[in-house]
Image (spheres, grey):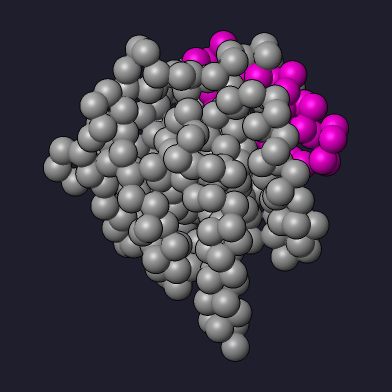
Amino acid sequence: MILIAGPCVIESRDNLFRVAEKLMSYHEDKTIDFYFKSSFDKANRTSIDSFRGPGMDEGLKLLDEVRKEFGYKLLTDIHDYTQAKPVGEVVDVLQIPAFLCRQTDLLVAAAQTKCVVNIKKGQFLNPADMRYSVKKVLDTRGVKEEGYEAAKKAGVWLTERGSTFGYGNLVVDARSFVIMRQFAPVIFDATHSVQMPGTEGGKSGGKREFVRPLSRSAAAVGVDGFFFETHFNPCEALCDGPNMLDLEDLGLAIKDIKAIQDSLKA
C-alpha cells in the first residue's frame, strides 16, 4: 500500500529531521510504498497571522536534505502553477490542495512535470466530478484513455479528505472511495478528514480520536493508500495540531490497517 506521512508543515530543520528519522521503519517495510510529506508553505491558512512555513526555496533545500539523509521519496503541495517546475525537480509527488482541485492551470503545470500528481478532492465537490480533474492531467500527458489503470500508469492519484458538513465540520462518505477508484488510485487522508475548519478562533480544530476508526473503515472498503500527518508532539505543532497523530498512534493506525487488509486476503 501507499503510505504518505510526515509533519503538516516544515517548522524547522530540527523538527523536520526529528519526525523523519522516526518514519524509517515504514520506508524499510517491503509491503509499503512510502512517501515523506511536509509543506514548505501553507498558503491557505485561516488567518494571515498563522505560521506558513519557510517558503519554497528554503523548504525545497530542507526536503532535499531529507531525501539525501534518509533515502525517502518526497511529496509536497503546490498552490500556484509557477511552483510546479521547480518543486517537481526535487520531489516525487506534487500534491494539489483540495481547494484548488479544479484549477486548470495548476493541474496542467503539474502534469507537465515527471512527478506523480496527487489531487485532493475538494470538500465541496461531488466525488464523481473528480474524473474531470484527472482528465486534465491525462490529456496534458497525452493519455486519451480514462479509468483506474490509465491513471495509475500515467501517475495520477486522488485523495479523499472529507466533505463539508454544515459549518466547521467534515464528514467522510465511504462511497467516495468506490466512486473515485473508477478514475484513479485513491488515497485516504485520515488526518485532514477529522478537521473542524475555523472552529478555534482564526484556525482549524480537529478530533484526532476519530483518525483510527475512519482509517479502519477505509481499509475495509478498499483504498490504495493512506495519508497521515504526524508529529512528535501534535499539541505543540504550528499547524493542524488538533488533527495530527503522534508517532506512536501512527504506528497503531498502520497496525490496524494491515490487520484488516490481511483479513480481507484470507
In the image, 116 versus 112, the foreground residue is 116
The location of residue 217, given as percent across then percent down, is 40, 68
Who's the residue at 53% across and 42% down the image?
233
Residue 22 at least partly seen: yes
In magenta, the rendered stretch is 59-85
Farthest residue, direction bottom: 266
Q: Is residue 265 shown above or below 235? A: below
The location of residue 2, given as percent across then percent down, is 63, 55
Quarter that holds the C terminus: bottom right
Left or right: residue 28 versus residue 40 is right
The location of residue 227, given as percent across then percent down, is 53, 49
State the image quarter where residue 211 is shown. bottom left
The location of residue 249, given as percent across then percent down, is 53, 59
Residue 138 at least partly seen: no
Left or right: residue 218 versus residue 19 is left
Who's the residue at 40% across and 45% down the image?
243
**Residue 78 among those drawn in magenta:** yes
Left or right: residue 254 versus residue 96 is right
Who's the residue at 47% across and 23% down the image?
42
Who's the residue at 43% across and 22% down the image?
104
Helix, strand or loop: magenta stretch? helix
State the image quarter where residue 36 is shown. top right
Quarter that holds the N terminus: bottom right
In the image, 164 versus 154, the foreground residue is 164
Q: How many marks?
A: 0
**Residue 108 among those drawn in magenta:** no
